[in-house]
Amino acid sequence: MIESGEPVIGIEVENVQSKFHLVSYYPVPGPRGIVGVGTAVTDVSHLKTVERSLEETNRKLKVLATTDELTGLPNRRMFAEQLEFALARARRGGLAVAILCFDLDRFKEVNDSLGHAYGDRTLVEVASRLRSGARATDVVARVGGDEFLIMLADLDVQEVPALAQTVISRIGGLLSDPLPVGAVELRVEASIGVAFYPTDSRDADGLLAAADAAMYVGKHALTHVA
């Protein structure tokens, strides 16, 4: 500043008491150049607190917008975004993507006979078992009611059917164990549909539709994972 003669405005400074100030420095001119430095200090601690509060609120709103409130899994919106990213990578790298669509059978009977509180706890337990059965890199989402989706991405085209079947078998084993829900133990069955990129569809909507259609074929044919 002394060399240039230009002021330095609005440096943010945090002190040891976590107080925030904006500090500006101004050259004090004399007859033969700059003879000193003037300083202006503004306490902006309250503004900083408000700023951090707004950032935290925005973070929470983003989480709520992309997360299923009941299970903590990604919701349909987040799953769709992750699917688009995975398909873009697959197109560039000649890779495969698998979508597994899970729909619980006779879940309405749980709500009708035991109440929605038991139904919600059942969904939470199912979500936990799906997450346990999937790989760490897979995306597990609850997309509405008793419907869940799992995405397996960045896979070899030749290996994807076998890998998808491995995940389905592992999840089937987890779901076959009784679910302790309150004072009762429930047995859950699920219909499953599978669709692959690029063989079943080359876009997100088509892939989801193919997995959903395959799931309903399985449901109507009474082929369940139990």
Image (spheres, helix red, strand yellow):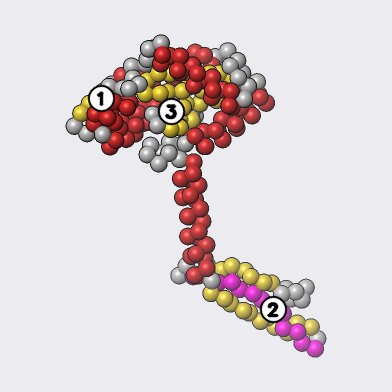
Relative to the observer, which residue lies in front, 157 or 1?
Answer: 157
Residue on which the image places disc 2: 26
Q: Secondary structure at mark 3?
A: strand
Amino acid type, residue under disc 3 in the picture:
Phe
Relative to the observer, which residue lies in front, 182 or 30?
Answer: 182
Q: Residues within 10 Å of mark 1 (few under 14, many from 20)?
A: some
Magenta segment, which residues? 19-31
Name the front one of labels 2 and 1: 1
Residue on which the image places disc 3: 148
- State which tag comes first along the sequence, 2 or 1: 2
Residue 115 marker? none
Does residue 67 sit above or below 112 in this rendering?
below
Task: Name the dominant secondary structure of the magenta segment.
Answer: strand
User: In the picture, which quadrant includes the N terminus?
Assistant: bottom right
Q: Position of residue 69 (x, y in %)?
A: 40, 41
Amino acid type, residue under disc 2 in the picture:
Tyr
Q: Residues within 10 Å of mark 2 (few under 14, many from 20)?
A: some
Amino acid type, residue under disc 1 in the picture:
Leu
Q: Position of residue 167 (x, y in %)?
A: 44, 19
In three-dimensional space, the C-alpha distance between marks 3 and 1, rounded to whole angstroms, equals 18 Å
Does residue 48 sit above or below 144 in this rendering?
below
Q: Position of residue 16 (x, y in %)?
A: 47, 69
Q: Is residue 133 visible?
A: no
| Residue shown at the point (60%, 31%) measured from the top left | 84
Residue on which the image places disc 1: 186
Name the front one of labels 3 and 2: 3
